[in-house]
Amino acid sequence: MGLGRVADTMTDQRAAAFTYDGGAVQPGETEQFRYPVSETYLGDPVRIPVTVINGSHPGPTVFLSAAIHGDELNGIEVVREVAHEWEHEHIHGTLVCMPVVNVPAFMTQQRYLPVYDRDLNRSFPGRSDSTSAQRIADQLFRNFVEPCDVGVDFHTSTRGRTNILHVRAEMDDPAVERLARAFGSNVIIDSEGASGTLRREATHAGVPTITVEMGEAHRFQRTLIDRAIDGVASVLAEYEFYPAEPVDWPGWRTVVSSGEKTWLRADVGGLVEMHVRRGSLVEAGDRICTITNPFKTDVVPVEAPFTGLLVGALENPLVYPGNPLCHLVELEGTTLRAIRQDRSGALPAGAE
Ligand SMILES: [Zn+2]
């Protein structure tokens, strides 16, 4: 499985059908269908929209998925545009596009599956004889993830927070590292990912997969969507899906291990005024935000403990002690110099 199969397909010089339980998409064909993964209380099917675009030339099979958390919308637009607005006539390979994976959570506009609040993104690879979440995960994994060579899963920050566009990837795995770098984001956070996430379980099953985090829940954020679409184009270029297209270099890049990122937390309850925007470079000692009480009397400043990039921040301005305020990534010399040179400390492209 995995990239070995790319080589096999390439040497065959024949494009193969993409098959799933219930159908097949032949080379040169595009199929749009709704695939049943569960049933409602009424016994009606719960079906997820899938588009499979099988090119007439052989090449890798790539899956793109979004809204595994039902209220994380930015990725939906990325996957839809790639599936339905791009020219696919000359592609070398197969695209499997799942713009709305968690249909029950999407319908209720929440993160988790409505029944028992289960997290679909902790349920992979799934089991056919277990909970509803595990059964849905199993259907998706067997039919549309395992047959692929690489995958990109789109997320946003949790409701009430926001983050810059960045990639999360298990960088110890060379095949994942290749994919992560190909996306062309400035920031890559290196982590294995939690057990049961699509990214981790697909990667461990031989399908290198990255997560792309971008912006807020409940929004279409056009600038971020456009950058993510460029990222998909760059990934497809890396695997010669479009042999003539170049792979992006983002100008500067920092690969951060999970230990090097810090959530600054509130020590008091109150109302937060942010002074720095998502994506900004902050110097050690800069005031990031202030927390005040309803009388605006007790003013508690929060300062940056080190120089770094503001990767994530809260959107909802209300905090209890212990609530996260912002997510700061420490930057070292060469990256810092590159950013200062590139942007003079201003917002990276695409930050809103
Ligand atoms: Zn998510």
Image (spheres, helix red, strand yellow):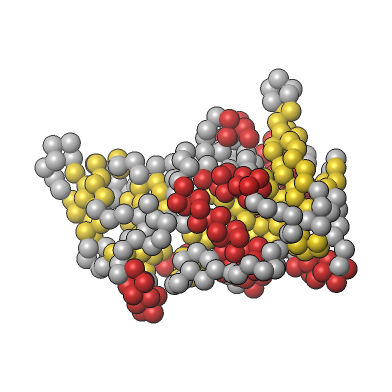
The percent coordinates of residue 323 (x first, y second) are 34, 47
Q: Quadrant of residue 21?
A: top right
Q: Nearer the viewer, residue 16 or 36?
A: 16
Residue 293 against residue 199 in the figure, above or below: above
| 277 to 316, vertically: above or below | below
Q: In the displayed structure, does residue 56 sit left or right of residue 203?
A: right
Q: Nearer the viewer, residue 57 or 189?
A: 57
On the picture, is 180 further left or further right than 224? right
Number of callouts? 0
What residue do we see at 67% from left, 69% from top? Answer: 244
In which quadrant will I find the N terminus? bottom right
| Residue at horizontal 42 percent and vertical 56 percent from the top | 350
The single residue placed furthest to the top in the displayed view is 42
Which quarter of the picture shows residue 76? Answer: top right
- Going by the picture, which residue comes out furthest to the bottom? 334
- Tell me if residue 205 comes above or below residue 216 in the rendering: below
Residue 280 visible in the shown view:
yes
- Residue 193 shows up from this direction: no
Q: Is residue 275 left or right of residue 110?
A: left
Q: Residue 152 appears at what percent x and percent y?
A: 62, 56
- State the residue at coordinates (56%, 55%): 229
Looking at the picture, how far across and down is residue 172, in whole percent? 60, 72
Instruction: Identify the residue at horizontal 59%, vertical 64% (top origin).
Output: 234
